[in-house]
Image: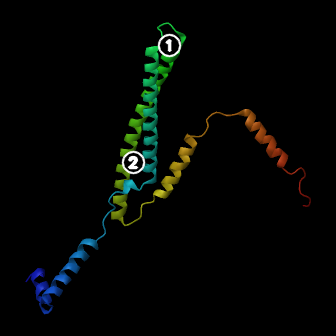
Amino acid sequence: MDLYQGFFIFTDMFHVELKYLVMLFFSAFLIFGCEKPPENPHLTDIIAQDFRNQEEGTSAALVQVEKNLKENINIMATLPAQSNLRHYYKSKNEQFVVERAKLKQQLRYWKVRIENRDVKVVYESTKAFYDGRKIASNDEAQAYAATKKLRQAKVTWDQKKRVAEHKASLSTAPTQAPAGH
């Protein structure tokens, strides 16, 4: 006698409706009671969301540069051939072409970063699920935020500002040492 027949022999004492309710309960327990790995962990990842936001910003900047380039080309078409404005718009167009190439390259970069991050997050969350532990992405997100802040910080060093800050810190410092030994 197999398990299936044994189950029905056990449930023969119930009415037909109760038998189906019990079978439905056990089926639902088997289906919904099992733990499953997360479905789409890359959609909740903070770093991947930041990558997507930066990709959107880059694509918006690319659209704006292409719009400016088209406007400048239209303006150049109306200008006389040997005018100074034509040379000005020609140099602006060259700058827009260079900027457009950089933005296209940056857009490809963000797409690759997003895809790599999604694969990494899915792999790590699945591995953590089967190892029976929580994925610790908070530390990684804090480290990412710190490096992003350093990357976007002002690189130039302003000597006058630093001297003014130093003088301000000297003026707030105590002038005498505390008394006593």
Q: Is residue 77 above or below residue 99?
A: above
What is the x, y in percent for residue 47?
45, 50
Q: Mark 1 and 2 residues: CB-CB less than 8 Å, in contact?
A: no
Q: Is residue 111 above or below residue 45?
A: above
> Which residue shows up at 48% across the image and 53% down it?
140
What is the x, y in percent for residue 108?
38, 36
What is the x, y in percent for residue 72?
46, 21
Q: Looking at numbered disc 1 in the image, what kind of residue is underneath it?
A: Arg
The answer to which image quadrant residue 155 occupies is top right
Callout in the foreground (1, 2): 1
Of residues 176 and 85, the one nearer the viewer is 85
What is the x, y in percent for residue 150?
57, 43
Q: Looking at numbered disc 2 in the image, what kind of residue is underneath it?
A: Arg
Q: Tell me the quarter of the image containing the N terminus.
A: bottom left
> Which residue shows up at 48% across the image and 13% down it?
79
Q: Which residue is mark 2?
A: 117
Number of on-image labels: 2
Q: Tell me the quarter of the image containing the C terminus.
A: bottom right
The secondary structure type at the circle numbered 2 is helix
Q: Residue farthest to the left?
A: 1
Of residues 92 and 163, the one nearer the viewer is 92
Of residues 153 and 101, the one nearer the viewer is 101
The secondary structure type at the circle numbered 1 is helix
Of residues 75 and 50, the one nearer the viewer is 75
Q: Is residue 93 above or below residue 149?
A: above
> Which residue shows up at 43% across the image and 20% down it?
74
The answer to which image quadrant residue 24 occupies is bottom left
Q: Earlier in the sequence, mark 1 or mark 2?
A: 1
Q: Which residue is mark 1?
A: 86
Numbered badge on residue 179 = none
Q: Residue farthest to the front?
A: 78
Q: Assess disc 1: are there few (<14), some (14-19) or many (≥20) residues with their C-alpha within 10 Å of its C-alpha.
A: some
